[in-house]
Image: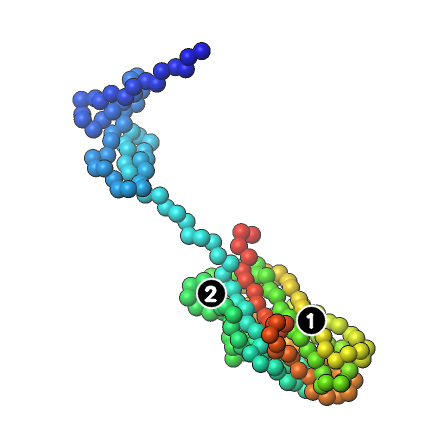
Amino acid sequence: RRPPRSTPLYSSAASDVYKRQGSAEWSLPTDDGTAGQYMKTDGSGALSFGTVTVPAAATNAPAFEYQLASAQTVADATWATIEFASKIYDTDGSGGTVYDTSTYTFTVPSGQAGKYFIYGGLVIYATAGGNQANHTLLLLKDKDDNNAGTAEANTSGHGYMHTLNMTSVFDMAVGDSLKLRGYMDTSGGGTVTFGHDAYPRSYFGGFKIIGI
């Protein structure tokens, strides 16, 4: 069957008012608007031009990643904060930063509580020719005795180098902080090195997870 004809619009007495026969009236805008605008109604017959608003793109900020700028030497069988100071990126989403290179700590800034994906890695080795007994990468939250995550290996004296990695998701409040510490106990009692190389294998980073 033939589709029904559309009912034509026609002007009423006022030159800027149009209506569909037997239906409501629409009052047209008195100007032409600007390029890219659309026509909208107030629900009572008054039409006007509106501008399309495009929401800002969502970003996983705050976000940071730092690496060791050089090899860090520590005493055998001693816990030490890993001195990540070579910035890859660091943003709070508003032009500021979230990682302190004097304390090697990430802190959640104001207004940015939420879930964060945190990751870290460390290549750690004993004096060349020495043997490692055990080694640990420890993620600390807020204070030095609050263990938030551990990557650990016990090689029982085999070899002198190992790479540790960890990932985790944390529900963090404003002001919460995280840092990484490393530890190696060697059978020979020599110095321990947190390695810096071209790969790199020693790093600390994280970002806020959006949409959850």
Q: Which mark is residue 164?
A: 1
Q: Residue at x 61, y 82 (%)?
A: 71
Q: Is residue 94 left or right of residue 190?
A: left
Q: Residue 30: where, in percent of width, then height?
A: 20, 35
Q: Residue at x 67, y 68 (%)?
A: 165
Q: CA distance from mark 2 to mark 1?
A: 27 Å
Q: Residue 61: where, in percent of width, then height?
A: 49, 61
Q: Identify the amino acid type marked 2.
A: Asp
- Residue 107 visible? The answer is no
Q: Residue at x 46, y 69 (%)?
A: 97
Of the image marks 2 and 1, the number of the one nearer the N terminus: 2
Question: Disc 2 vs disc 1: which is toward the camera?
Answer: 1
- Residue 164 visible? The answer is yes
Q: Residue at x 25, y 24 (%)?
A: 18
Quadrant where the N terminus is found in the figure: top left
Q: Quadrant of residue 189?
A: bottom right
Q: Residue furthest front?
A: 198
Which residue, given by chain and number where applicable, does mark 2 sit on?
92
Q: Quadrant of residue 81?
A: bottom right
Q: Residue 64: where, in percent of width, then height?
A: 52, 67
Q: Residue 7: where, in percent of width, then height?
A: 32, 18
Alpha-carbon neighbours of circle 2 within 10 Å: few (<14), some, or many (≥20)? many
In the rendered view, tell whether residue 188 sits above or below residue 158: below
